[in-house]
Amino acid sequence: MLAEDPLDGPPVSRRRWLQTGAAILGALTGVGYAGSASAATRVVALGEVASKVRRDERWLERELKKALKAELARIELPKNARDHFVLSVSLTQLFTKQREGRDPKRGEAESTAVISAVLRKAKGGTLHAILRGKATAVDSHVDAREIELSALHGAVHSALRRVPDAIST
Protein backbone atom coordinates (compact mmCIF):
# COMPACT_ATOMS: atom_id res chain seq x y z
CA MET A 1 0.00 0.00 0.00
CA LEU A 2 1.32 3.38 -0.98
CA ALA A 3 1.32 6.28 1.46
CA GLU A 4 -0.64 9.33 0.42
CA ASP A 5 1.30 12.45 -0.38
CA PRO A 6 0.19 15.20 2.05
CA LEU A 7 0.59 17.78 -0.70
CA ASP A 8 -2.07 16.05 -2.80
CA GLY A 9 -4.83 17.20 -0.44
CA PRO A 10 -7.30 19.97 -1.12
CA PRO A 11 -5.80 23.34 -2.05
CA VAL A 12 -5.22 25.73 0.86
CA SER A 13 -7.00 29.03 0.51
CA ARG A 14 -5.16 32.32 0.52
CA ARG A 15 -7.02 33.25 3.71
CA ARG A 16 -5.69 30.14 5.48
CA TRP A 17 -2.14 30.99 4.37
CA LEU A 18 -2.53 34.51 5.75
CA GLN A 19 -3.90 33.20 9.06
CA THR A 20 -1.01 30.75 9.39
CA GLY A 21 1.51 33.45 8.48
CA ALA A 22 -0.02 35.86 10.99
CA ALA A 23 0.13 33.19 13.71
CA ILE A 24 3.79 32.49 12.99
CA LEU A 25 4.61 36.20 12.87
CA GLY A 26 2.76 36.72 16.15
CA ALA A 27 4.71 33.92 17.79
CA LEU A 28 8.01 35.31 16.55
CA THR A 29 7.08 38.82 17.65
CA GLY A 30 6.15 37.49 21.09
CA VAL A 31 9.57 35.87 21.36
CA GLY A 32 11.14 39.21 20.45
CA TYR A 33 9.20 41.04 23.13
CA ALA A 34 10.02 38.41 25.73
CA GLY A 35 13.69 38.75 24.86
CA SER A 36 13.67 42.51 25.33
CA ALA A 37 12.12 42.54 28.80
CA SER A 38 14.71 44.47 30.77
CA ALA A 39 18.45 44.57 30.63
CA ALA A 40 18.74 43.44 34.23
CA THR A 41 16.68 40.28 33.77
CA ARG A 42 18.58 39.36 30.62
CA VAL A 43 22.07 39.93 32.01
CA VAL A 44 21.50 39.10 35.69
CA ALA A 45 19.35 36.20 36.82
CA LEU A 46 18.31 35.79 40.42
CA GLY A 47 19.81 32.61 41.87
CA GLU A 48 19.53 31.29 45.41
CA VAL A 49 17.78 33.51 47.94
CA ALA A 50 18.15 32.57 51.59
CA SER A 51 17.85 34.00 55.05
CA LYS A 52 20.22 33.19 57.88
CA VAL A 53 17.91 35.05 60.22
CA ARG A 54 16.15 32.41 62.31
CA ARG A 55 12.46 33.17 62.52
CA ASP A 56 9.28 31.17 62.19
CA GLU A 57 7.76 33.77 59.87
CA ARG A 58 7.75 33.00 56.16
CA TRP A 59 7.08 36.57 55.10
CA LEU A 60 10.73 37.49 55.47
CA GLU A 61 12.11 35.36 52.62
CA ARG A 62 9.10 36.20 50.43
CA GLU A 63 9.64 39.94 50.97
CA LEU A 64 13.36 39.53 50.31
CA LYS A 65 12.64 37.91 46.93
CA LYS A 66 10.13 40.62 46.05
CA ALA A 67 12.60 43.36 46.95
CA LEU A 68 15.37 41.71 44.93
CA LYS A 69 13.20 41.29 41.83
CA ALA A 70 12.01 44.89 42.04
CA GLU A 71 15.53 46.23 42.47
CA LEU A 72 16.89 44.11 39.59
CA ALA A 73 14.16 45.50 37.35
CA ARG A 74 15.10 49.05 38.39
CA ILE A 75 18.86 49.04 37.95
CA GLU A 76 20.43 50.07 34.67
CA LEU A 77 23.13 47.74 33.45
CA PRO A 78 25.86 48.53 30.93
CA LYS A 79 24.66 47.99 27.37
CA ASN A 80 27.97 46.39 26.40
CA ALA A 81 27.74 43.55 28.97
CA ARG A 82 28.87 40.40 27.20
CA ASP A 83 28.46 37.86 29.98
CA HIS A 84 25.41 36.63 31.82
CA PHE A 85 25.45 36.47 35.60
CA VAL A 86 23.65 34.80 38.49
CA LEU A 87 23.07 36.76 41.68
CA SER A 88 22.75 34.73 44.90
CA VAL A 89 21.64 36.63 47.99
CA SER A 90 21.45 35.95 51.69
CA LEU A 91 19.92 38.03 54.45
CA THR A 92 22.61 37.68 57.12
CA GLN A 93 21.24 39.96 59.84
CA LEU A 94 17.94 41.56 60.74
CA PHE A 95 17.39 42.88 64.21
CA THR A 96 15.07 45.40 65.76
CA LYS A 97 15.47 47.18 69.04
CA GLN A 98 13.38 49.67 70.93
CA ARG A 99 15.00 52.92 71.95
CA GLU A 100 14.00 56.16 73.54
CA GLY A 101 12.76 58.76 71.12
CA ARG A 102 12.80 62.52 71.27
CA ASP A 103 9.58 62.40 73.23
CA PRO A 104 10.24 60.35 76.39
CA LYS A 105 6.62 59.10 76.37
CA ARG A 106 6.98 57.60 72.89
CA GLY A 107 9.68 55.13 72.02
CA GLU A 108 11.19 54.50 68.63
CA ALA A 109 12.01 51.24 66.93
CA GLU A 110 15.29 50.84 65.08
CA SER A 111 15.78 48.00 62.61
CA THR A 112 19.00 47.05 60.82
CA ALA A 113 19.29 44.64 57.89
CA VAL A 114 22.46 43.25 56.30
CA ILE A 115 22.52 41.55 52.88
CA SER A 116 25.36 39.47 51.43
CA ALA A 117 25.34 38.79 47.70
CA VAL A 118 27.54 36.88 45.29
CA LEU A 119 27.62 37.65 41.57
CA ARG A 120 28.77 34.64 39.54
CA LYS A 121 29.17 34.17 35.81
CA ALA A 122 26.31 32.06 34.50
CA LYS A 123 28.64 30.01 32.34
CA GLY A 124 31.02 28.12 34.59
CA GLY A 125 29.96 29.73 37.88
CA THR A 126 33.15 31.78 38.28
CA LEU A 127 32.95 34.20 41.18
CA HIS A 128 32.78 37.73 39.76
CA ALA A 129 31.93 39.95 42.74
CA ILE A 130 30.95 39.89 46.39
CA LEU A 131 28.46 42.57 47.37
CA ARG A 132 27.21 43.70 50.77
CA GLY A 133 24.41 46.02 51.69
CA LYS A 134 23.38 47.42 55.04
CA ALA A 135 20.58 49.76 56.03
CA THR A 136 18.97 51.00 59.21
CA ALA A 137 15.44 52.31 59.55
CA VAL A 138 14.16 54.25 62.56
CA ASP A 139 10.57 55.25 63.19
CA SER A 140 7.99 55.70 65.88
CA HIS A 141 4.24 55.23 65.25
CA VAL A 142 4.94 52.29 62.90
CA ASP A 143 4.71 48.55 63.42
CA ALA A 144 8.09 46.83 63.91
CA ARG A 145 7.48 44.67 60.82
CA GLU A 146 7.15 47.78 58.62
CA ILE A 147 10.41 49.15 59.99
CA GLU A 148 12.10 45.81 59.28
CA LEU A 149 10.76 45.89 55.72
CA SER A 150 12.16 49.39 55.24
CA ALA A 151 15.56 48.26 56.47
CA LEU A 152 15.38 45.17 54.25
CA HIS A 153 14.57 47.23 51.14
CA GLY A 154 17.36 49.66 51.98
CA ALA A 155 19.90 46.86 52.36
CA VAL A 156 18.84 45.30 49.05
CA HIS A 157 19.20 48.66 47.31
CA SER A 158 22.58 49.23 48.96
CA ALA A 159 23.94 45.87 47.77
CA LEU A 160 22.47 45.89 44.26
CA ARG A 161 23.45 49.45 43.39
CA ARG A 162 26.99 48.11 42.93
CA VAL A 163 25.94 45.46 40.37
CA PRO A 164 26.36 47.69 37.26
CA ASP A 165 29.92 48.61 38.30
CA ALA A 166 30.74 44.98 39.05
CA ILE A 167 29.50 43.88 35.63
CA SER A 168 31.42 46.53 33.72
CA THR A 169 34.76 45.51 35.29
Image: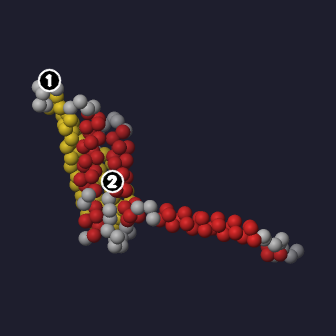
Q: Determine which residue is flagged by label 1.
A: 105
Q: Residue at x 45, y 65 (%)?
A: 36
Mark 2: few/some/many CA within 10 Å (<14, 14-19, 20+): some
Closer to us: 120 or 59: 59
Q: Please identify the quadrant where the C terminus is shown.
A: bottom left
Q: How many marks?
A: 2
x and y percent of residue 38 in the render? 41, 61
Mark 1 is on which residue type? Lys
For the question of whether residue 167 can be seen, the reply is yes
In the rendering, at what x and y percent does residue 94 appear? 24, 41
The relative height of residue 3 versus residue 46 in the rendered view (above or below) is: below
Whole-angstrom CA distance, mark 1 to mark 2, is: 37 Å
Residue at 26% in and 32% down: 142
Residue situated in front as seen by the camera: 48 or 43: 43
Does residue 23 appear left or right of residue 96 in this picture? right
Q: Which mark is residue 72?
A: none
Q: Residue at x 37, y 47 (%)?
A: 66
Query: What residue would you read off at disc 2?
Result: 71
Classify mark 1: residues with Cα within 10 Å, few (<14), some (14-19) or many (20+): few
Counting from the top left corner in percent of width and height, residue 63 is at 35, 43
Which residue occupies 79% across, 75% down?
7
Of helix, strand and loop, which one carries label 1? loop
